[in-house]
Amino acid sequence: MAHGITVPFDGVSLADHREWFEELVDLGYTDLWSSEVDGSDAFTPLTLAAAWTPSLRLGTAIVSAFTRGPALLAQSAAALAEAAPGRFALGIGASSDVIVESWNGITFAEPYKRTRDVLRFLRSALAGEKVDATFDTFTVRGFRLSRPPEIPPPLLVAALRPGMLRLAGREADGAIINWLGAGDVPTVAAEVGPGKEIVARIFVLPTEDVGAARAVGRRLIAAYLNVPVYAAFHEWLGRGPLLREMWAAWKAGDRKAALAAIPDQVVDDLLVHGSPAQVRARLARYAANGVTTPAPAIVSAGIDLRQAIRDLAPSA
């Protein structure tokens, strides 16, 4: 099993990440997975890691299929695959209406088709083929990478519900999953099917202060699970009855009531907290249930982040 971690680390300048990355190797971590929300882009931290730590596997979890043009996305992926031959995986996904539409001014239309089309385009482009094709959601005329990677990266799809999960299993090399409990993994993995990589970004807060952990968890859950794609995901997983009061309060503009309405059960399912030993045991449950590459995202609220990384290391 791979032992990943989500980067970059909160509160640490990218310029100072080198010694952190080098220590990760000594601690037994195997993978670094980045993302794009409202901080750094997904490629820059991995580009630094490609130069600084030549043994770590690198992956994006995820870059949006909307916010870069298909050719530019292929160029970015090809460059990183060239910098880290054989150890880069490209994860793409629809992202959300907030990121795509509200923040980037791009219409968030037909997310399944857009992700599928970008996946098919990248498969051809990263293999060095000339792409001259009309897809359902865009057209590319006469594009060919002048520097195709010697080893094309595996392509993974971020997926929440059956359609995208099945696309990941059918046409990609695996799936990237997010914001789910260990008990939800079998449901999700069954849609992907056997023989595929399943990367899970898992939010982790190693503290034995249950009240503090739940307060942080409620803020995170309210921020994410009121986004329509995540709300629909948890409806599908069966959490609708537990979250309806929160959704109603949020829609009414009562943020305080929305936070209070999130049950402890939901927080404890979706935010892994407890002592380092308890957290490691919870992460092992994700792996036992079908996750091949855990990529915990350590929430730094009220803890020593560097020590938490050490305490949760495979070598601990």
Image (cartoon, grey):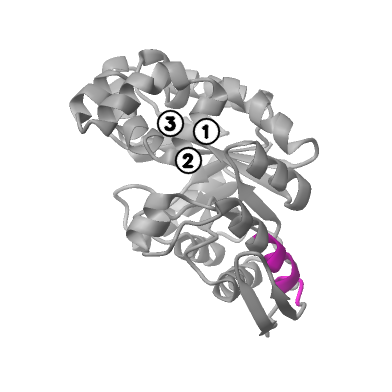
Residue 300 drawn at (x, y percent): 32, 37
- Residue visible at 49% across and 33% down? 232
Q: Is residue 299 left or right of residue 173?
A: left
Residue 97 drawn at (x, y percent): 42, 51
Q: Quadrant of the N terminus?
A: top right
- Total labels: the figure holds 3
Q: How many other residues sit within 10 Å of disc 3, few (<14), some (14-19) or many (≥20)?
A: many
Decide whether residue 122 is among the magenta residues: yes
The residue segment tinted magenta is 119-128
Q: Which residue in the structure is indicated by mark 3? A: 204
- Residue visible at 63% across and 72% down? 78
Disc 2 and disc 1: Cα gap in Å?
Answer: 6 Å
Q: Which residue in the structure is indicated by mark 1? A: 233
Q: How many other residues sit within 10 Å of disc 1, few (<14), some (14-19) or many (≥20)?
A: some
- Residue 224, by quadrant, is top left
Q: Do callouts 2 and 3 mark residues in contact (Cβ within 8 Å)?
A: no
Decide whether residue 166 is among the magenta residues: no
Residue 200 drawn at (x, y percent): 57, 38
Q: Do callouts 2 and 1 mark residues in contact (Cβ within 8 Å)?
A: yes
Q: Amino acid at mark 2?
A: Val
Q: Is residue 167 left or right of residue 137?
A: right
Q: Amino acid at mark 3?
A: Val
Q: Which residue in the structure is indicated by mark 2? A: 229
Residue 239 drawn at (x, y percent): 48, 20
Q: Is residue 112 above or below residue 262?
A: below
Q: Amino acid at mark 1?
A: Phe
Give the SS element for disc 1: helix
Q: Which mark is residue 84?
A: none
Give the SS element for disc 3: strand
